[in-house]
Image: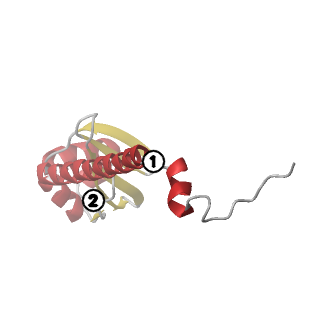
């Protein structure tokens, strides 16, 4: 006995075919999951932007001092960080103010040497941090 092919109209049309595979509860669950996912993404982005603004405000004078040394402020990305990059003493340098769950901190990287510091908020603290890595920068040479 071969399988019988049922015409589309006899099978109940398009509505009957979809109702056997997708019902309203499944569709509601999928849409609710997507809504929660979009909400979580928006909350994540807002959290990152608030950290960026907070770090930028708290370290304003240190950032200005770093820019005075020739470092350039980078565009904000998606992480909780404010970053300046450039050359210090002829070496590639990156100075980052980082936030997040670990709390605010500063990461200084000059010539491949990386140093994690407590949060550097002003020009004096920045000069002291740079003096440890590059003494010629702090003395003005």
Q: Quick one: 122 or 129, which is closer to the camera?
A: 122
Left or right, 128 with respect to 4, comes to left
Q: For the point 22% across and 63% down, which residue is it?
A: 67
Q: For the point 32% across and 52% down, which residue is it?
A: 38
> Percent x, y for residue 139?
23, 52
State whether residue 74 is above or below residue 54.
below
> Percent x, y for residue 33?
37, 45
Q: For the point 36% across and 47% down, which residue is it?
A: 28
Q: Which residue is mark 1?
A: 23
State whether residue 30 is above or below residue 84.
above
Q: Does residue 80 appear anywhere in the picture?
A: no
Query: The residue tagged with tag 2: helix, strand or loop?
Result: loop
Total numbered labels placed on residues in the image: 2
Q: Which residue is mark 2?
A: 141
- Viewer-nearest of discs 2 and 1: 1
**Label 1 Cα neighbours within 10 Å, binned few <14 / some 14-19 / many ≥20:** few
Query: The residue tagged with tag 1: helix, strand or loop?
Result: loop
> Percent x, y for residue 37?
35, 48
**Label 2 Cα neighbours within 10 Å, binned few <14 / some 14-19 / many ≥20:** few
Among the two numbered marks 2 and 1 on one chain, the one whose residue lies closer to the N terminus: 1
State whether residue 69 is above or below residue 117.
below
Does the residue at mark 2 contact the one at mark 1 (Cβ under 8 Å)?
A: no
Q: For the point 40% across and 61% down, which residue is it?
A: 90
Whole-angstrom CA distance, mark 2 to mark 1, is 74 Å
Q: Does residue 104 appear anywhere in the picture?
A: yes
């Amino acid at each position: 006995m071969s399988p019988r092919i049922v015409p589309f109209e006899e099978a109940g049309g398009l509505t009957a075919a979809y109702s056997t595979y997708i019902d309203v509860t499944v569709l509601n669950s999928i849409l609710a999951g997507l809504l929660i996912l979009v909400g979580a993404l928006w909350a994540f982005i807002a959290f990152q932007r608030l950290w960026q603004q907070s770090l930028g405000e708290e370290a304003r004078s240190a950032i200005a001092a770093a820019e005075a040394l020739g470092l350039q402020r980078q565009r904000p990305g998606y992480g909780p960080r404010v970053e300046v990059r450039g050359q210090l003493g002829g070496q590639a340098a990156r100075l980052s103010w980082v936030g997040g769950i670990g709390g605010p901190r500063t990461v200084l990287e000059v010539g491949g040497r990386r140093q994690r510091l407590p949060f550097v908020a002003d020009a004096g603290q920045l000069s002291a941090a740079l003096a440890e890595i590059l003494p010629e920068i702090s003395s003005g040479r």
